[in-house]
Image (cartoon, grey):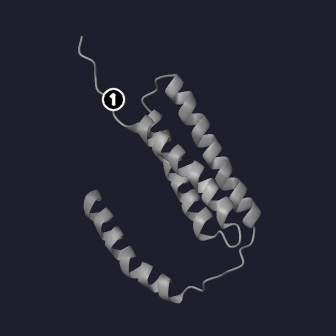
């Protein structure tokens, strides 16, 4: 099976699984190691931002990979900040209001640049 077919199959198989989860999971669940999970996630974002900046400064061809990975982390963080907000909705929206634009900056760094013809 080719890689493309494998990805299509995996994506399509996830669709009914999402329905199962959406109809069977409880609305609330106490999580163990929540502090470690949250700080670890933010640490990964910091490493991604720093790596992207460093690679960008070196004009390294791997920069888009770091930028896209970091953008993905930032978008995911914004999503979880908002949907798990509880009573801290305003603070969560403010955080997402910082994370989403920063993710868009990362994506702009990853965008292909036109080659100047001399």
Residue at image position (68%, 59%) is: 91
Q: Is residue 15 above or below residue 90?
A: below
**Is 97 left or right of 111, judged from the image as shown?**
right
Residue 37 placement (x, y as % from top left) = 69, 61
Please report the residue visible at 50 percent of the width from the left and 40 percent of the height from the top. 66
Identify the residue at horizontal 65%, vertical 55% (top origin).
41
Q: Is residue 69 left or right of residue 116?
A: right
Residue 49 appears in which quarter of the rendering? top right
Q: Secondary structure at mark 1?
A: loop
Q: Nearer the viewer, residue 24 or 82?
A: 82
Quadrant in which residue 76 is drawn? bottom right
Q: Which residue is mark 1?
A: 113
Q: Is residue 15 left or right of residue 60?
A: left
Q: Is residue 85 above or below residue 53?
A: below
Mark 1 Cα shell of 10 Å, populated few (<14), some (14-19), many (≥20): few
Q: Quadrant of the N terminus?
A: bottom left
Above-or-below relation of 16 to 89: below
- Tell me residue 23's x, y (percent): 48, 88
* Residue at the limit of the structure toward the front, as seen here: 90
- Residue depicted at 63% across the width and 55% down the height: 94
Decide if residue 84 is in sight here.
Answer: yes
Q: Quadrant of the C terminus?
A: top left
Place of residue 29 in the rendered image (x, y in percent of width and height, measured from the top left):
67, 80
Residue furthest top in the image: 118
Q: Can you give x and y, in whole percent of width and height, for residue 5 in the image? A: 25, 63
66 or 76: nearer the eye? 76
| Front residue of 89 and 73 | 89
Residue 2 in sight? no
């Amino acid at each position: 099976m080719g890689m493309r077919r494998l990805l299509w199959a995996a994506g399509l198989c996830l669709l009914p699984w999402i329905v199962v989860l959406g109809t069977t999971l409880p609305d609330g669940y106490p999580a163990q190691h929540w502090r470690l999970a949250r700080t670890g996630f933010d640490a990964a974002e910091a490493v991604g931002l720093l790596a992207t900046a460093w690679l960008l400064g070196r004009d390294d061809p791997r920069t888009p990979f770091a930028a896209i990975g970091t953008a993905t982390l930032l978008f995911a963080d914004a999503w979880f900040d908002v949907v798990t907000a509880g009573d801290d909705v305003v603070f969560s929206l403010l955080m997402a209001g910082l994370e989403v634009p920063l993710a868009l900056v990362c994506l702009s760094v990853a965008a292909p640049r036109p080659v100047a013809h001399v």
